[in-house]
Amino acid sequence: MRNAAITGWGMALPEQVLTNADLERMVETSDEWIVARTGIRERRIAASSDTTLSLSLAASRQALQVAGLAPADVDLIVVATVTPDMFMPSTASLLQRELGAERAGAFDLAAACSGFVYALNVAAQFIRAGTYDTVLVVGADTLTRMIDFTDRGTCVLFGDGAGAVVLQATEAPVGILSTLLGSDGRGACHLFVDGWGTGIVDDEDRTALRRPYMKMVGSEVFRFSVRVMGEAAEAVVKQAGLTLADIDLLIPHQANIRIIDAAAKRLDLPRERIWANLDRYGNTSAASVPICIAEAAAAGALRPGMNVVLVAFGAGLSWGATLVRWGTDGVERRGGGE
Ligand SMILES: CC(C)(COP(=O)(O)OP(=O)(O)OC[C@H]1O[C@@H](n2cnc3c(N)ncnc32)[C@H](O)[C@@H]1OP(=O)(O)O)[C@@H](O)C(=O)NCCC(=O)NCCS
């Protein structure tokens, strides 16, 4: 049985920090409200020199270095993003050019905050099927470019960033062991950015909406996310033939600490078995899970043999989960690093 193991990881964040105190000067809010209702204290904001591509590139270079691979070893690049640098070509194609990954196919995948988990699962299928041996999977977003900084209901929640992992083929029972992808398009109206796509056919509307902003019904998204996070995590654990007691680490999408706590309660997981960094980065959309992976790996919190559940939700409404057995057993090291 061919499996897909995570052999490299990396992350990149803009340097510019926006604190809750900064937001107090921009909208009617308070540090106390934001911390109590979300758990977020500060977030990183893309400067004019930061783009989804530039952050993806930095995270990808790190991930390849950790894996000990050269760009030419990569067979496929998948970038999960809803904030591509441009409509076309894909950010993945631009990343391929910047990396010099000349052998790789490349495409973007749009599943909003669930994007990285979706992309990881799609990439793993190519490896399981024997089509490819080495896939670079990136989750990257610069959502603050689509945030209305006069809307206190959204502007306190989001930050920018990118994370990347390298997936490699192995015959050992490690890597992505079970997967789940979900969608309920009836909830599309609860979280969306309009004025951006070709659905706007009237030229006047297009001009009026030239700056597209995110719109959200927070309470609806909250209710949905609490339910699907727990359900999806449970489902992938069961699919892998394990029980909740076997979960060593939960890496949830970083949207709101209250959502994470509710999921943890349902899964009966203590705080020390949950990775959370949203106090520092806010919700970085598709980047949140791979940033957590890179942080947890660097901190030594991911050890061979551990059962790690990745779970995310977002616009769509969409959700996804994966059970990863951490480790690189049986991975053939072909490259020599950059
Ligand atoms: C957005 C969210 C933090 C709001 O928290 P909440 O507890 O649901 O709060 P409510 O929306 O019920 O609002 C409560 C009050 O706080 C106010 N409020 C909203 N944002 C505020 C802010 N930044 N500062 C101060 N007050 C705020 C509201 O206007 C409301 O006031 P009212 O009662 O006078 O109308 C929460 O719903 C949430 O996190 N939802 C999920 C969003 C998400 O994760 N989106 C991304 C998915 S990938």
Image: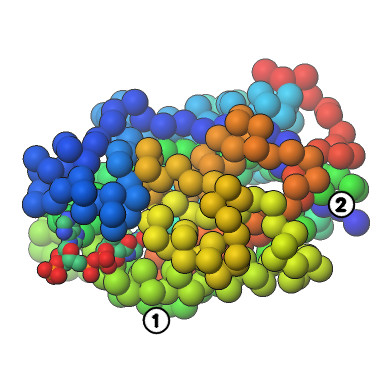
Q: Is residue 200 left or right of residue 188?
A: left
For the residues labelled 1 and 2, the Cα–Cα distance comes to 37 Å
Residue at 21% in and 49% down: 32
Q: Is residue 193 left or right of residue 337?
A: left
Do tag 1 and tag 2 residues touch (Cβ < 8 Å)? Answer: no
Give the mark nearest the N terminus, 1 or 2.
2
Q: Secondary structure at mark 2?
A: loop
Q: Quadrant of residue 297?
A: top right
Q: Quadrant of residue 68?
A: top right
The answer, for residue 84, to whether it is visible in the render is no
Q: Is mark 1 within 8 Å of ligand 1?
A: no
The picture places residue 238, in percent across and down from the top left corner, at: 74, 71
**Residue on which the image places disc 1:** 186
Report the number of discs: 2
Residue at 24% in and 51% down: 34
| Residue kind at label 1, given as amino acid type | Arg
Farthest residue, direction bottom: 186
Above or below, 159 against 239 in this view is: above
Q: Is mark 2 within 8 Å of ligand 1?
A: no
In which quadrant of this rendering is ligand 1 seen? Answer: bottom left
The picture places residue 220, in percent across and down from the top left corner, at: 32, 74
Residue at 75% in and 59% down: 246
What colour scheme does the image use? rainbow
Camera-nearest residue between 108 and 242:
242
**Neighbours of disc 2 within 10 Å: few (<14), some (14-19), many (20+):** some
Q: Quadrant of residue 233?
A: bottom right
**Neighbours of disc 1 within 10 Å: few (<14), some (14-19), many (20+):** few
Residue at 87% in and 34% down: 332
**Residue on which the image places disc 2:** 173
